[in-house]
Image (spheres, rainbow, N blue to C red):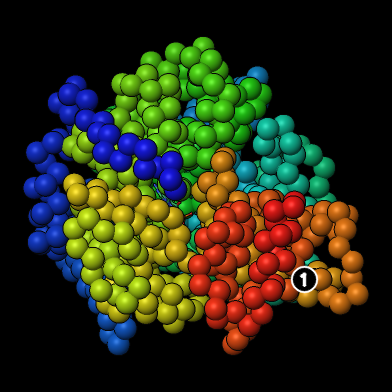
Amino acid sequence: MERRMNHPNALYPVPDDFAANARIGRDDYARLYDASVTDPEAFWKQVAQRLDWFKAPTKIKDVSFAVEDFHIRWYEDGELNASVNCLDRHLATRGDKTALIFEPDHPDTPSKRVSYRELHARVCRLANALRALGVQKGDRVTIYLPMIVEAVVAMLACARVGAVHSVVFGGFAPNSIADRVADCGSKLVITADEGLRGSKKIPLKANVDEALKLPGTNSVETVLVVRHTGGAVDMQMPRDRWYDAVVEGQPDTCEPERMNAEDPLFILYTSGSTGKPKGVLHTTGGYLAYASYTHECVFDLREDDVYWCTADVGWVTGHSYIVYGPLANGATAVVFEGVPNYPTVSRFWEVIDKHQVTLFYTAPTAIRALMRDGDEPVKRTSRASLRLLGTVGEPINPEAWRWYYETVGDSRCPVVDTWWQTETGGILISPLPGAIDAKPGSATKPFFGVQPALVDANGAFLEGEAEGNLVLLDSWPGQMRTVYGDHQRFIDTYFKAYPGMYFTGDGCRRDADGYYWITGRVDDVINVSGHRIGTAEVESALVSHPKVAEAAVVGFPHDLKGQGIYAYVTLIAGEASSEELRKELVAHVRKEIGPIATPDHLQWAPGLPKTRSGKIMRRILRKIAENAPDQLGDTSTLADPSVVDSLVKERRDA
Ligand code: 6R9
């Protein structure tokens, strides 16, 4: 954290030429923000007009965060279809415009352009095939695909027939797929033979096969398999069907389902501080209006922009800012299958030149990794097409921000540091690039309608310059509506800590200019390279190993990943620690959850620091992991203080 404070007030003003032509200019922000919070009904009614409705909403907002009368409804009498908004309505004016540019893993493989007309036809063919396979409005469909055009087609085809998609990131292991399939009772899974990332093959279909052997997954009737690499897979008949065979011969038009604004659009699983990942549920009208409106304002979208968000569709950023936001806006979006450092560390910048990308949106972890290789791999490319840069997923340290701004953007392009969450559906705190001067490391100011506040541990409001827990005082249309299958958990997780407010789980500082600086999670969620991992998930994976008696997992500062995973493991009596066992346990976690949960450090712990009531004191474990034993704080409530001394000693000697 210290590094962020280097130049706390360095201001990067909006470039004049950018401000002059921006959608939201310098004078607009205060006026529109004011309007959005004084009369939200009128404001969001106006915003809803950007969508095509079968039936326009007359009821705009009906929200109560009070636990006893809890409800969140936006546009509740409106009717629309998300795929119609992303496709059909563009056909008359943008039919031949490129909707997607597919850039494959290897640069020698040809890229492909898909027009709005072609994307519409492909979505309709798959939607017809889904209906023919018995998928109906309200059914759940799991999508486990690489970053290929079919991933976008699959999401929109679900939306067309009113099926609720649940995209599972390709980096998750069979157990994690099975948990997610079982939790929502998916009827159908769409996958591919294999994925490709940096020339490495990912056995997607084999992972699905493993997952569907696990208990709780009987709901799955059909598995559609996209032929992508051509790698060999086992096809289990009649369950498994080739994607190309089922879409073959289907009509290229398809009657869209009429959805109520509050009908579910998708479920996306995300990690919380306790238990299994939660199925975050987003609905149709509010989500789509919010994703498209924020995409237009924050990226200052123009008709001829080429927009590239490097996220994976397995995360919310891919949902809102590769698929729904950009396509609802009729934009041209790049879909990139590969990784930033393959075949070389210039890949991002080469792709920007190749496709003349104007708007580029990536994660701080990628920026930090590429920054390590110096300026030359960037400077040997042109990047003249760029006009705006964005970041998302974790706090960006000012050094990385400045390198991004100066080296990647040649000090020409505004940087938007966008803070938001799976739960929020879209960006909540971010500069508007033509209106708000940037400060490296700050997400700056709230978007329209968003009312952030800081509270202390007791829920008392902190005014002015302050640091505390970040809460939101009122709803916005893109807010999640429930945890799938467990509405009480939704209320308990987000609305109980500070009654009447949404608790984000993030810590935050507000400076004298009213700028917000997100400091990171204050709960037991670790943010590894922008991916959320619950400490409880890693702990339960560890204790599922027969030799492990107990485990405690914390985050610690990591130069590249932002945070790394630090695991303390107590073995069952009689088991001896060894380097081999350490490797085995790390591999076990990868197998149970997936590579993204790989522990960076695993320390043997003869005992864990606990209170007399048996609660593990994570605060102490975090300090030991940080190698800051002088900052352990109060240890007087420990049942056995000597446990700490031995952990500290072992950490120091490691
Ligand atoms: C969109 C996304 C959400 C958590 C969030 C916060 C962190 C995201 C950030 C940021 C600082 C930013 N986070 N963007 N922290 N500055 N610009 O990442 O969703 O995967 O649900 O993660 O990520 O801690 O609470 P998700």
Which is nearer the eye, 416 or 325?
A: 416
How many marks do you count on the picture?
1
| Residue shown at 24% from the left, 50% from the top | 511
Q: Is residue 643 left or right of residue 113?
A: right
Residue 591 percent location from the top left of the image: 76, 58
User: Dot 1 lies on which element?
Assistant: loop
Residue 390's spot in the image, x, y percent?
A: 38, 36
Task: Please give the residue where the numbered disc 1 appears in the rendered image.
Answer: 606
Q: Is residue 622 left or right of residue 574?
A: left
Question: Residue 276's x, y, as percent?
Answer: 59, 71
Residue 74 appears in the figure? no
Disc 1 residue type (three-letter): Pro
Determine if residue 397 is in view.
yes
Instruction: Answer above or below: position of 339 versus 475.
Output: above
> Mark 1 CB in 8 Å range of ligand 1?
no
- The correct choice, above or below, for 70 with respect to 470 in the image is below
Q: Nearer the viewer, residue 548 or 333?
A: 548
Q: Residue 118 in the image: state x and y as whole percent.
A: 47, 35
Q: Is residue 576 left or right of residue 225?
A: right
**Frontmost residue, 496 versus 260:** 496
Q: Could you tell me which residue is drawn at 28 percent across and 64 percent down?
A: 454
Q: Nearer the viewer, residue 398 or 29?
A: 398
Residue at 31% x, 59% y is 467
Quarter holding residue 78: bottom left
Residue 247 vs residue 410: left or right?
right
Q: Which corner quadrant of the image does residue 590 belong to?
A: bottom right
**Residue at position x 28%, y 85% in the image:** 69
In this rendering, the answer to whether 138 lies above or below 161 is below
Are there few (<14), some (14-19), or many (20+) residues within 10 Å of tag 1?
Answer: some
